[in-house]
Amino acid sequence: DGSLSKEFGASHDYKSRGGCLADAVGMGKTATMLGLVLSSPRASSEEGDTLVVAPGHLVHQWKTEIEKFSDAIEVVVGKRAYERVASYAPSGKHTHRIVLVDVEAVMNETQKFRYDWNWSRNPCRTRGLDRQTIDLYKK
């Protein structure tokens, strides 16, 4: 029915660093995510970017939608999953930056980290990416 159990998380103390938005196609996931990014001001110019991982055929759709909704977000389309962006600070009038990457690139590169995963050495964290969004679909 879409509601959360009252017991969910009641016995667990933790600090969330993210979440999961799993709405159906056309329900506004992109707009919701952009609102979240824009409502979280960067504490400093060294704060990390937001990584969006999407199927290859949706990467440029994400870019178009981001540019349609906000002038404050710089969009970088990455060729590799953990590519370092030139500088931490977004350029010019932009207050935030989103790095878009094809899910296939992530799947190929994460094979390297499969057997020795450690959050402190997470490739996203070491490349200055503080948030990650994954947009997948069922065939």
Image (spheres, grey):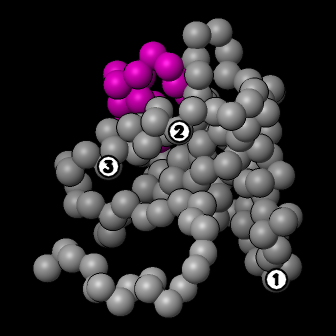
Q: Quadrant of the C terminus?
A: bottom left
Up-down: is 42 above or below 57?
Answer: above
| Residue drawn at 67 percent across, 22 percent down | 90
Would you identify the image quadrant in which residue 123 lies? Answer: bottom right
Q: Is residue 4 above or below residue 63?
A: below
Going by the numbered disc 3, the residue's amino acid type is: Lys
> Residue flagged by tag 2: what amino acid is it?
Ser
Tell me if I can see residue 80 in this picture. Answer: no
The image position of residue 11, as x and y in percent, is: 50, 90
Residue 115 is labelled as 1
Label 1, label 2: how many angstroms apart (C-alpha)?
33 Å
Residues shaded magenta: 59-75
Instruction: Tell how many labels.
Output: 3
Q: In this view, does 65 lie to the left or right of 89?
A: left
Residue bearing the label numbered 3: 29
- Residue 65's tag is none
Task: Give whichever of 16, 84 is nearer the camera.
Answer: 16
Determine the image quadrant of residue 87: top right
